[in-house]
Amino acid sequence: MSSIETFAGSITVADLERDPFPIYRRLRDEAPVCHVPAVELTLVTRWEDVHHVARHPELFTADVGSSPLTRTLGQNMLTVDGGEQRRIRATIDPAMRPRVVAGYAPAVIEPIAERHLAAIEPDGGGELMATYCEPVSVLALGSVMGLGDADADTLRRWFGALALGGSNFESDPGKQAIADAASAEVDDRVLPLLDRLEQEPDGSVLSDMLHTQPPDGERLSKPEVLANLKLILLGGMQEPGHALGIALWALLQHPEALAEVRAQPELLDGAVEEALRWHSPVGTQTRQVTERTEIAGVTLRPGTVIAAVLASANQDERHWQQPERFDIHRTGAHAAFGLGAHHCAGASLARHEVRLPLRLLLERLPRLRLDAEQPVELSGWEFRAPLALHARWD
């Protein structure tokens, strides 16, 4: 057995959860297409190869039989290709177009952020993931989706449980049981709402998903709406809230960059994009090989399940100059929102959910800084974020 095979066999889920980047770096250098037994996936880790997977859905299908997303959520727009994927996206995309989002996002997001900031501002310090980043994100998405009566704690709990299932590549039955219970709870909570929306459309995204007639194909059934709603809860709540935490942590870790953003607020958008690249909140796109093919000199047989590792592509030294460095002036498109036809439908909304609350936080909290007594620990390889973000301000 070669040294790299021994290394791949030694990788544990705990290793990946704690810090996957040293693992990705070695795989990029020595085995850019490598099977990792712990997660039962062949990881594709270089920028060009990850893009190759996204550009060739005929060779790498999203319809993965063993997908933990399908197992947890049901068939959804991330686990189908072609006309079926376009049919589902047709019910969601109109509300998520950049110009449309720009028209409603501030009115939805800013009052939520203002309310949560007002609650913590007098304290002079606190843990910002649970009190600001995550609740602002989940409540904003809940409002856009039409789940306005669901409180932040419920939405965050649903996300946490669904995320356990969605990243359960190792098929841990304990994790799956927690995810399945949350999935059933979402069904119980949302089905009566769908029944009402069926008779009384209200213009929410959930209502649009139920009533939009796709150009090709039938309207979505209620089970299809539920499966895709759960996907949106998983990605649309996770990525903005976690990205907000990562962007805030990145700026507080780099005082010079923070000073630049404070002096020139127009640099904030670039800082957010760089944070998304630097520590991508979503780790992979999972695919299944449809016919014998080759990547980076490695032959892949039909049925092989691969993970195109977005987080690794975003740090590939072959594409980025000094990728380990956080540089708010960096240019170039990253892969944090996915690639190809499966690029995140809510990317524009997510960017607003990060930029607006972050801008407000920096404007309103003088001398915002990390709490030196409580170091920040990031966790996750499929869904990555600070476990907690303790800060102080004046």
Image (tube, rainbow, N blue to C red):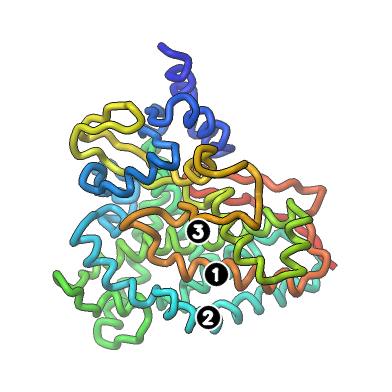
Q: Give the tally of numbered discs.
A: 3
Closest to the observer, 146 or 27: 27
Whole-percent x and y of residue 182? Answer: 40, 57
Q: Residues within 10 Å of mark 3 (few under 14, many from 20)?
A: many
Marks 1/2 in contact by CB < 8 Å: the verdict is no
Q: Is residue 177 visible?
A: no
Looking at the rendered structure, the secondary structure element under dot 2 is helix
Distance in Å between CA atoms under marks 1 and 3: 10 Å
Distance in Å between CA atoms under marks 1 and 2: 10 Å
Closest to the observer, 338 or 191: 338
Marks 1/3 in contact by CB < 8 Å: the verdict is no
Q: Where is mark 3, residue-wise?
A: 239
Image vertical order of residue 302 relative to residue 86, above or below: above
- Residue 283 has which mark? none
Residue at the image position 72 percent from the left and 70 percent from the top: 264
Marks 2/3 in contact by CB < 8 Å: the verdict is no
Residue at the image position 30 percent from the left and 49 percent from the top: 55
Q: Residue furthest right?
A: 394
Residue at the image position 31 percent from the left and 55 percent from the top: 78
In which quadrant is the N terminus drawn? top left
- Residue 108 has which mark? 2
Residue type at mark 1 is Glu
Q: Where is mark 1, residue-wise?
A: 353
Looking at the rendered structure, the secondary structure element under dot 3 is helix
